[in-house]
Amino acid sequence: PAFYDRGNVQGSVKIQLASSTLSHSGIKIVFEGVIQNTSKTLSKEDKFITLEKELVPAGKITQQVLIVPFHFNNVEKSYESYRGIVFNVIYRLKVILKTTFKQYAWEREIGVVHPMSREIMNQDNPPFKLDVKIAKMLKLSFEMDHTKYGTKDICTGRVIFKETSMKMKMMMIQIIRKETVVGGDTDTAILCR
């Protein structure tokens, strides 16, 4: 499921027993926002938000199936969900059930989106132009309609050959995603050719 910034995070937890009863020390749900550094040199998680609610107080569950609703009101979700090369931004719901001898945890990742309006995207988003010249052999112009694009936008532009004095078999354009994380980790990935 996908959620928006400042929106409610709600749902229900279904607990299905394998036996007839279960004694426990409490069942809680945790909403977490985490930045995972997945670089080759360092692999760690930094939590930037943690909210916790008790679902069921300590006691005994006698029902075969227990459905417990949960609700986190007006949750600030500072960043969009993102899976990258160097880092991931993820939000997850974690249900924790404690018994006398053991703690059980189940988690589910949720998506967070921050939709930008067309007006915001069009502010300070001029066309992009790059002229390339290689001695007297090749001169071309590369033009894009905008400098910034949203994740659902279609990148449009053109390549204009102004001067060529060599035979060309093929020309390739690549869209490259570059990630830079504070601390110096940088990585790139070719998204399409």
Image (tube, helix red, strand yellow):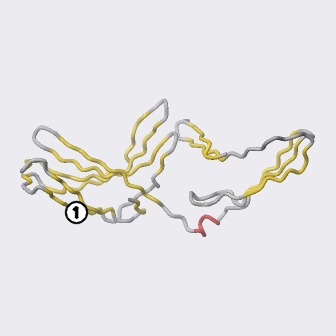
* Neighbours of disc 1 within 10 Å: few (<14), some (14-19), many (20+): few
Residue 78 vs 193, above or below: the answer is below
Compared across the picture, whether 105 is left or right of 32 comes to: left
Residue appearing at x 18%, y 54% in the figure: 15
Camera-side residue of 18 and 113: 18
Kindly identify the amino acid type of the residue bearing the numbered disc 1.
Answer: Pro
- Quarter assignment of residue 101: top left
Q: Residue furthest front?
A: 169
Residue 88 vs 124, above or below: the answer is above
Q: Residue furthest top?
A: 41
Q: Does dot 1 land on a helix, a strand or a loop?
A: strand
* Screen quadrant of the N terminus: bottom left
Q: Give the residue pinned by disc 1.
A: 69
Percent from the top left, x then y, of residue 157?
74, 57
Compared across the picture, whether 185 is left or right of 46 comes to: right
Percent from the top left, x then y, of residue 183?
52, 36
Percent from the top left, x then y, of residue 163?
91, 47
Compared across the picture, whether 113 is left or right of 110 comes to: right
Residue 72 vs 31, above or below: the answer is below
Marks counted in the figure total: 1
